[in-house]
Image (cartoon, helix red, strand yellow):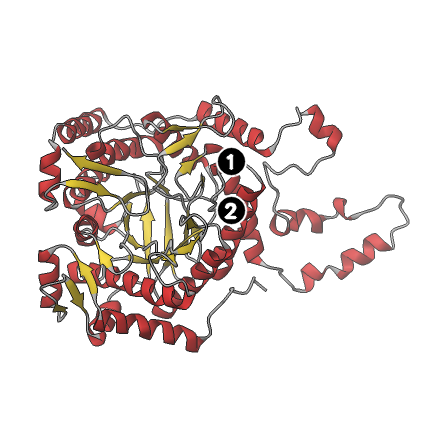
Amino acid sequence: MKLKKLEVLSKEEIETITSSALRILETIGIKIDDEKTRKRCEEKGAIIDGISSFVKFPENITKDLLKLVPDSFKLHGPDGSFNFEVNTKTTQFATIGTPVRIYDPKLEKNKLKKSVLADTIQQIRVVDSLENVNCSHIDVWPSDVKFTAVHAHCLYQWAKNTKKPYGLGCLGRLASQDMVNITSLIVGSEEDLIKRPRLVGFMNPTSPLQLPKLMTNGLEVFAKYKQPTIVAPEALAGTTAPVTLAGLLAQTCAEIIGGIILAQVFSPISPVFFGTVSCATDMRSGNSALGAIESSLITIAIAQIARYYNIPSRGPGGVTESKCFDVQNGFERFSTMSLAAQAGINYITCAGTYESSLAEALELLVIDDELVGLVRRAMEGINVNEDTIAIDVIKKVATSEQKGTNFLAESHTRKYMYKELYIPKLIDRGRRSTWKKKGSKDIIERARAKVDQVLADFQPYELTKDLDTQLLAIIKEIEARPIELYMNAEGISGGSVNITGTEISFEKS
């Protein structure tokens, strides 16, 4: 049988948490910064508090809007040849779009550098080569590109360097419309983009109970064009949410549901993920603790609650607070990945990251791909039938009079070896003498060698000359925009703008 799903909540506890979340939305509401968005919610039956900007959703309205959410959808690469389905029964693995620094093996040990566009391109290419990680996001933010044009540069590189889908943040109305326009040009039309989604949006509520204007503006565009969007708060137990995990779950579910039903207000039947990056707070420092065991308990609970609503879930896996490639890095990344998978999270992100997903290492990307292979094998469980019990084979080998007889030469072994045994490419299981002959390399060194080989062998995907010219012209046009145009489009008067859950921000001078 396959591995049973891991659960931390009873049916009664799920109903208690979800009913509490609905009560929060009905009696407290959720703060929506954008006035026009609040009015659209009011048109659907929500109640607006004109003083505080909180919007209250009666329970019947919330339940009706949740019924509109699709339980599955497909994601496609630029030309549509690569695709996979996201649903409530299977598990897909992806990266995450928050790192602003990257490991460089040429630097002093454990040192990081600011990532640049060349790093972004390498990351996209490595993900393209991976067997088990199916989607890349803007994982390595290029510091050498104007912030308000990052999305344009990254989509251009996406079209040239991968066959897989791509993820970007809901970074406001203007940038999100740019993403739709550029991607429509790449794939041929808006109609094709809507029919075969290519983009994954990130919409991060701010805890407690706030939907920022920049994010809701972007969500409106993603919903209009039916690009699946992850709604995922990062509530921290004890700082931005109650320290009790049950209280955190009630709050974070209200935030998730608030974002999900807003997508349906914008455009009914919009595909979304019931997402989370909510986690423990390290009470000594006040920092987030994604690798903490309590964070995995939250993720497991969200998997159950998402299934309760029949909505695909998203959760973190392969996450760690470690600042280097040490034992902590290894055990936190594998424990969070394996627990999320065993819980039945449908879309597990964060491959290739460390330091609370603020740093990236291409070496970790290929290691995580192998860890996903291990996890997938574990999820398959043990197949028990008459042929796999293999009594006839046991009898043949056990009673053979030929010296040295074993199961290696049997056709039964050849038939099942690749199905039953996961054969890793990076993990070393040889003898010490063999390991020494190969240079005594640790797994990071072996992973680096694989990365180098992938990058050396990579052949960019060809764009037509006309498409390439058009894309470069759009990038130039976006780069030429003054920052005031961007902020005015979002209704932001001044000050700084921070992207929730990241170290990414910009200011209007």
At label 1, the amino acid type is: Cys
Quick one: 307 or 81, which is closer to the camera? 307
- Please name the residue shown 22% across and 29% down the image: 146
Q: Is residue 304 visible?
A: no
**Residue drawn at point x = 8 percent, y = 41 percent:** 488
Q: Which corner quadrant holds the C terminus?
A: top left
Side of 464 where 346 appears, left or right: right
Residue lying furthest front in this view? 284
- Front-most of 8 and 186? 8
Disc 1 designates what residue?
324
Q: What is the C-alpha distance between the residues marked 1 and 2? A: 12 Å
Neighbourhood count class around disc 2 (C-alpha, 10 Å): few under 14, some 14–19, many 20 upward: many
Percent x, y of residue 233:
32, 55
Locate residue 162: give its quadrant: top left
Q: Which is nearer the eye, 346 or 399? A: 346
What SS does tag 1 mark?
loop
Task: Say left or right for 87 vs 421.
Answer: left
Residue 276, x across and y down, in percent? 36, 56
In front: label 1 or label 2 = 1
- 87, above or below 78, in the image: below
Per the image, the residue denoted by label 2 is 333
